[in-house]
Image (tube, helix red, strand yellow):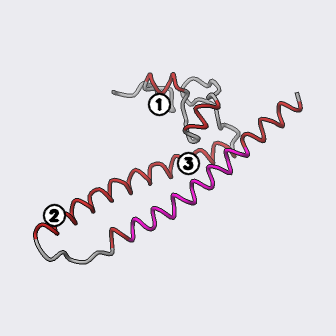
Amino acid sequence: MATMIRSMRNAVSAFEARLTSQRDDLAMRIYRHRMDVVSGREPDDETAQAVENTSRDMLAATLERERRTLREIETALIRIKNGEFGICGGCGAKIPKARLDALPWARLCVHCAEQGINSSGLRMAV
Protein backbone atom coordinates (compact mmCIF):
# COMPACT_ATOMS: atom_id res chain seq x y z
CA MET A 1 0.00 0.00 0.00
CA ALA A 2 2.77 2.45 0.95
CA THR A 3 4.61 1.56 -2.25
CA MET A 4 1.52 2.31 -4.33
CA ILE A 5 1.01 5.69 -2.62
CA ARG A 6 4.67 6.56 -3.11
CA SER A 7 4.41 5.55 -6.77
CA MET A 8 1.34 7.76 -7.24
CA ARG A 9 3.12 10.70 -5.57
CA ASN A 10 6.12 10.20 -7.84
CA ALA A 11 3.88 10.15 -10.92
CA VAL A 12 2.10 13.33 -9.83
CA SER A 13 5.45 14.97 -9.08
CA ALA A 14 6.65 14.05 -12.57
CA PHE A 15 3.52 15.58 -14.10
CA GLU A 16 4.00 18.69 -11.96
CA ALA A 17 7.58 19.09 -13.17
CA ARG A 18 6.50 18.55 -16.78
CA LEU A 19 3.63 21.03 -16.48
CA THR A 20 5.85 23.62 -14.80
CA SER A 21 8.40 23.31 -17.59
CA GLN A 22 5.69 23.57 -20.25
CA ARG A 23 4.21 26.59 -18.47
CA ASP A 24 7.56 28.38 -18.38
CA ASP A 25 8.33 27.58 -22.03
CA LEU A 26 4.88 28.67 -23.13
CA ALA A 27 5.02 31.91 -21.13
CA MET A 28 8.33 32.77 -22.81
CA ARG A 29 6.93 31.91 -26.25
CA ILE A 30 3.85 34.08 -25.60
CA TYR A 31 6.10 36.96 -24.57
CA ARG A 32 8.13 36.64 -27.79
CA HIS A 33 4.97 36.42 -29.91
CA ARG A 34 3.56 39.53 -28.25
CA MET A 35 6.76 41.37 -29.09
CA ASP A 36 6.49 40.17 -32.71
CA VAL A 37 2.94 41.53 -32.96
CA VAL A 38 3.95 44.89 -31.53
CA SER A 39 7.24 45.37 -33.35
CA GLY A 40 6.94 45.52 -37.05
CA ARG A 41 7.81 47.88 -39.81
CA GLU A 42 5.43 49.33 -42.30
CA PRO A 43 5.39 47.36 -45.56
CA ASP A 44 6.34 49.18 -48.74
CA ASP A 45 3.43 48.16 -50.99
CA GLU A 46 -0.08 46.68 -50.90
CA THR A 47 1.09 43.10 -51.40
CA ALA A 48 3.55 43.38 -48.56
CA GLN A 49 0.80 44.97 -46.44
CA ALA A 50 -1.55 42.05 -47.20
CA VAL A 51 1.15 39.53 -46.29
CA GLU A 52 1.93 41.45 -43.10
CA ASN A 53 -1.77 41.56 -42.13
CA THR A 54 -2.18 37.83 -42.75
CA SER A 55 0.95 37.07 -40.74
CA ARG A 56 -0.27 39.21 -37.86
CA ASP A 57 -3.70 37.54 -37.92
CA MET A 58 -2.09 34.11 -37.81
CA LEU A 59 0.22 35.20 -35.01
CA ALA A 60 -2.71 36.63 -33.05
CA ALA A 61 -4.60 33.31 -33.41
CA THR A 62 -1.51 31.40 -32.28
CA LEU A 63 -1.08 33.75 -29.35
CA GLU A 64 -4.68 33.22 -28.24
CA ARG A 65 -4.36 29.43 -28.50
CA GLU A 66 -1.15 29.55 -26.46
CA ARG A 67 -2.82 31.74 -23.82
CA ARG A 68 -5.66 29.22 -23.48
CA THR A 69 -3.17 26.38 -23.15
CA LEU A 70 -1.23 28.35 -20.53
CA ARG A 71 -4.44 28.83 -18.52
CA GLU A 72 -5.13 25.08 -18.73
CA ILE A 73 -1.61 24.29 -17.53
CA GLU A 74 -1.90 26.73 -14.63
CA THR A 75 -5.26 25.21 -13.68
CA ALA A 76 -3.73 21.72 -13.78
CA LEU A 77 -0.97 22.88 -11.42
CA ILE A 78 -3.65 24.19 -9.04
CA ARG A 79 -5.43 20.82 -9.26
CA ILE A 80 -2.16 19.13 -8.29
CA LYS A 81 -1.85 21.36 -5.22
CA ASN A 82 -5.47 20.66 -4.29
CA GLY A 83 -5.06 16.90 -4.73
CA GLU A 84 -7.55 16.83 -7.62
CA PHE A 85 -5.14 16.13 -10.47
CA GLY A 86 -6.03 13.13 -12.61
CA ILE A 87 -9.67 13.08 -11.51
CA CYS A 88 -12.31 13.70 -14.19
CA GLY A 89 -14.24 16.90 -13.61
CA GLY A 90 -17.29 15.36 -15.30
CA CYS A 91 -17.76 11.94 -13.74
CA GLY A 92 -15.15 11.88 -10.96
CA ALA A 93 -13.36 8.83 -12.37
CA LYS A 94 -9.60 8.56 -12.55
CA ILE A 95 -8.20 9.93 -15.83
CA PRO A 96 -6.02 7.23 -17.42
CA LYS A 97 -2.27 7.84 -17.37
CA ALA A 98 -2.12 7.48 -21.16
CA ARG A 99 -4.48 10.45 -21.53
CA LEU A 100 -2.46 12.50 -19.04
CA ASP A 101 0.73 11.56 -20.88
CA ALA A 102 -0.79 12.89 -24.09
CA LEU A 103 -2.54 15.90 -22.54
CA PRO A 104 -1.19 16.50 -19.02
CA TRP A 105 -3.65 19.33 -18.33
CA ALA A 106 -6.69 17.19 -19.21
CA ARG A 107 -9.68 17.95 -16.98
CA LEU A 108 -11.92 15.19 -18.33
CA CYS A 109 -11.61 11.49 -19.04
CA VAL A 110 -11.93 10.46 -22.68
CA HIS A 111 -15.55 9.39 -22.25
CA CYS A 112 -16.69 12.72 -20.75
CA ALA A 113 -14.64 14.67 -23.29
CA GLU A 114 -16.31 12.72 -26.13
CA GLN A 115 -19.73 13.29 -24.58
CA GLY A 116 -19.09 17.03 -24.37
CA ILE A 117 -19.42 17.24 -20.60
CA ASN A 118 -17.87 20.33 -19.01
CA SER A 119 -16.06 20.52 -15.69
CA SER A 120 -19.37 21.29 -13.91
CA GLY A 121 -20.81 18.00 -15.11
CA LEU A 122 -23.14 19.75 -17.57
CA ARG A 123 -23.46 18.79 -21.22
CA MET A 124 -21.92 21.38 -23.51
CA ALA A 125 -23.70 22.56 -26.63
CA VAL A 126 -22.11 20.97 -29.67
Q: Residue furthest toward the left?
A: 46
Query: What secondary structure is the magenta-colored segment mainly?
Result: helix
| Horizontal side of residue 6 vs 96, given as left or right | right
Quick check: marks 2 and 1 in contact, CB under 8 Å? no
Provide residue 54's location: percent of width, then percent of height. Answer: 22, 59
Q: Residue at x 70, y 39 (%)?
A: 83
Badge 2 marks a residue whose secondary structure is helix
Residue 50 numbered tag:
2
Instruction: Check disc 1 and report its element: helix, strand or loop.
Output: loop
The residue to which callout 3 is attached is 73
The nearer-to-camera label among 3 and 2 is 2
Residue 66 locus on image (x, y percent): 44, 53
Which residue in the structure is indicated by mark 1? 118
Which residue lies at the image location 84% right of the left edge and 37% below the top edge? 6
User: What amino acid is labelled 3 in the image?
Assistant: Ile
Residue located farthest toward the right when viewing the structure as drawn: 2
Q: Nearer the viewer, residue 119 or 103?
A: 103
The residue range painted magenta reads: 13-35
